Image: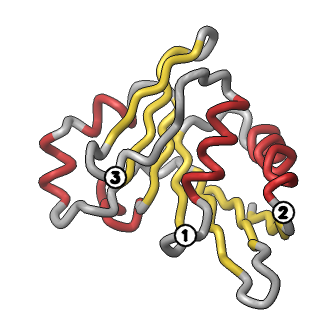
């Protein structure tokens, strides 16, 4: 099942996040694809806020993983694999412990570790439209 949504402004993102959560209510692993600057981290910030994160949400570009706490959902794990050169680097951080924890896992640059990802995940692809700065956002379950 693939959904396509056009996002014309940041003001629309909370509703798009709500649609994502309603479309995949039991899923916990979300993989975000898109070019640098497409809006992956911005989408994740709004998603985390919707899930009850009170901490500041920032991309873990250098740390690889950030953990955010919520009162009702426990931990939410945010990964950024942009700087990963070999899948062994991800194995060294014990990725299975996170991905199979039943906690929300939000993954930027999943294509870097595709072979390590579970089968049952939701992909969010963000494509920039050059003409008007809007985004096309696709939701698709693998």
Q: Name the residue under label 3.
A: 61
According to the picture, the residue beneath numbered tag 1 turns out to be 37
Q: Kindly state the secondary structure of the residue where label 1 is placed.
A: loop
Q: Can residue 125 be seen here?
A: yes
Q: Is residue 42 left or right of residue 94?
A: right
| Element marked by disc 2 | loop
**Of pointers 1 and 2, the one earlier in the residue sequence:** 2
Instruction: Estimate the spatial distance between the alpha carbons at disc 3 and disc 2, rounded to whole Å.
Output: 25 Å
x then y, percent, for residue 7: 83, 65
Which image quarter holds the C terminus?
bottom right
Question: What residue would you read off at disc 2?
Answer: 9
In this image, 94 relative to 141: left or right?
left
Residue drawn at 78 percent across, 90 percent down: 131
Residue at 81%, 39% in the rendered image: 22
Q: Residues within 10 Å of mark 2 (few under 14, many from 20)?
A: few
Q: In which quarter of the image is residue 88?
A: bottom left
Q: Which of 13 and 97 is in front in this view?
A: 13
């Amino acid at each position: 099942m693939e959904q396509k949504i056009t996002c014309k402004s940041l003001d629309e993102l909370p509703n798009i996040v709500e649609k994502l959560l309603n479309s995949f209510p039991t899923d916990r692993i979300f993989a975000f694809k898109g070019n640098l600057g497409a809006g992956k981290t911005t989408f994740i910030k709004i998603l985390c806020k919707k899930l009850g994160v009170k901490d500041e949400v920032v991309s873990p570009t250098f740390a690889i993983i950030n953990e955010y706490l919520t009162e009702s959902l426990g931990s939410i794990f945010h990964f950024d694999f942009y700087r990963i050169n070999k899948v062994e680097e991800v194995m060294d951080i014990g990725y299975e412990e996170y991905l199979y924890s039943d906690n929300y896992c939000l993954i930027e640059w999943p294509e870097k570790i595709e072979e390590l990802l579970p089968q049952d995940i939701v992909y969010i692809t963000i494509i920039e439209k050059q003409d008007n700065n809007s985004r096309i956002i696709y939701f698709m379950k693998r």
